[in-house]
Image (spheres, helix red, strand yellow):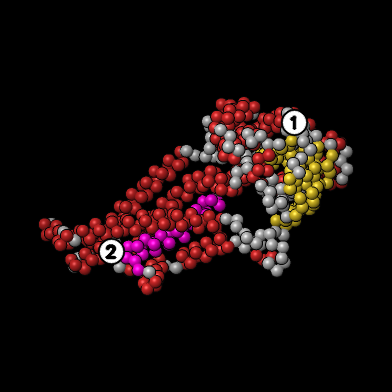
Amino acid sequence: MIKVKNLHKYFGELYVLKGIDLEVKQGDVIAIIGPSGSGKSTMLHCINRLEEPSDGHIYIDNEDIMAPDCDINAIRQKVGMVFQHFNLFPHKTVLENITLAPSLVKKVSKDEAEKTAYELLEKVGLSDKALSYPNKLSGGQKQRIAIARALAMKPEVILFDEPTSALDPEMIKEVLDVMKELAKEGMTMLIVTHEMGFAKNVANRLIFMDNGKVVEDTEPNEFFNSPKSERAKEFLDKVLNK
Amino acid sequence: MDSYLSVLYNTFMKDERYMLIVNGLMFTLSVTILAAVIGIILGVVLSLMTISDFRPFKHTKSKKLAFLRDFNPLNKLALFYVTVIRGTPTVVQLLILFNLVFTGILEAPVFVVAVIGFGLNSAAYVAEIIRAGIQGLDKGQMEAARALGMSYGQSMRVIIIPQAVKKIMPALVSEFIVLFKETSVVGMIGGNDLTKAAKEIAANSFRAAEPWLLAALIYLLLTTLFTYFMRKVEKRLKESD
């Protein structure tokens, strides 16, 4: 479904991604972990070309998204994204946040878009917030709305960029629960996260990145019980013994 | 006291001199408003040029032309314009426009020259205000819009511009007030504005204090009025936040 081949990314002189290879199958729930600065977020941003890759190839449903004639806006309809800082549109109500892209980009009728939006709000448990503005919501609520907004485009895969990192500890669970539900329904998900428990219990694959490279690509249990690389052992030592 | 009233009468009413003030004020206001319209339209264009990601040589493979990869001609052009306008005095710009461009090359009445001159001038400042407003928005807004499949144009139109407008409204009103006051130099090219009217009344009536003070008072009243409206608008914008 997604194929990343030999992906490189420079920010000026800074060499951030040093040849990433990755294949994502439908239904995969992949947790991407690693120290900060290891390139996890950058890789995620390259997959829908929010960051322009410097070199390499990325295929989504066998379409080369770096080809000059690729319609990236059409690709992005299939690839949802959820951000660390939610990035809800503050001048739009919750309902408008969710219906905006479907009506504008997919030309879905207003009624249809609103019907879907209410179903999604029901799903994330925030039906009563439809007409509120984002600044009236807590962090956890905002992130659940952001997930609903991504789902409204009926994507094939959703990229989560540290979805719980900006949340108060008490609100992490409500967001993770929604994500767990999605995983159960078979949604393909790539999740950059620091939630080791979630990575262990929900993901079916775990990718450990360090210094711009994929160091391990394995089963979560195997990774936590018997990491192969020294770097991963060191990392686990630090995060689990804190 | 009676004698002072008669002085005032002589100064402003004799020979219908007050009409100079009325006509001058009309001149000042029309130049300001029309120039502001030009300033806004051209300012928007300039600011969009500045923030555009138009790099025609982005994909060049040639090593020799590598330095052109980040070259953005629209951005450079807008930057040049803003630098020139902000780096030279308004009066000098007006004089150049009046004595060089609109003499010999084109012919136009002073009013038209003034509108164009102040419009071109204001555009540079408006462009900077809008650019700062847009670039001051959270980068995540554009990312979120693009990630949902919206085009650059759609994202700008529906997400970025409406938020930026709210942010820059106060600064735009300030710019309007500055423009309004700045039109007082239009006498240099023969425009009969409010300041020029005061000057003429002073010359004809041999009274210096009253005409100038009256002009100052009128400027002050109007700028206060604009500021008052700005505060109102600002308050309303804050409420919907």
Magenta stretch contains residue B91: no
Give the quarter of the image for residue B149: top right
Nearest the camera: B87 or A138?
A: B87
- Label 1 is placed on what type of residue? Gly
Q: Position of residue A59 (x, y in %)?
A: 75, 46
Q: Position of residue B200 (x, y in %)?
A: 23, 66
Mark 2 element type? loop
Disc 2 chain ID? B
Residue A186: numbered disc:
1
Nearest the camera: B37 or A220?
A: B37
Q: Nearer the viewer, mark 2 or mark 1?
A: 1
Magenta region, main secondary structure: helix
Q: Which residues are magenta?
A: B107-136
Q: Which residue is mark 2?
A: B192
Which residue is depicted at the point 84% across and 43% down? A216
**Numbered marks: total:** 2
Q: Residues within 10 Å of mark 2 (few under 14, many from 20)?
A: many
Q: Quadrant of the N terminus of chain B?
A: bottom left
Q: Position of residue B210 (x, y in %)?
A: 22, 61
Residue A90: numbered disc:
none
Disc 1 chain ID? A
State whether residue A159 appears in this view. Answer: yes
Which residue is depicted at the point 45% across and 59% down? B123
Which residue is depicted at the point 39% across and 64% down? B117
Which residue is depicted at the point 76% across and 40% down? A1
Magenta stretch contains residue B120: yes
Mark 1 element type? loop
Nearest the camera: A111 or B131?
A: A111
Name above or below for residue B196 compared with residue A67. Answer: below
- Label 2 is placed on what type of residue? Asn
Q: Are marks 2 and 1 on the same chain?
A: no
CA separation in Å, label 2 and label 1: 75 Å
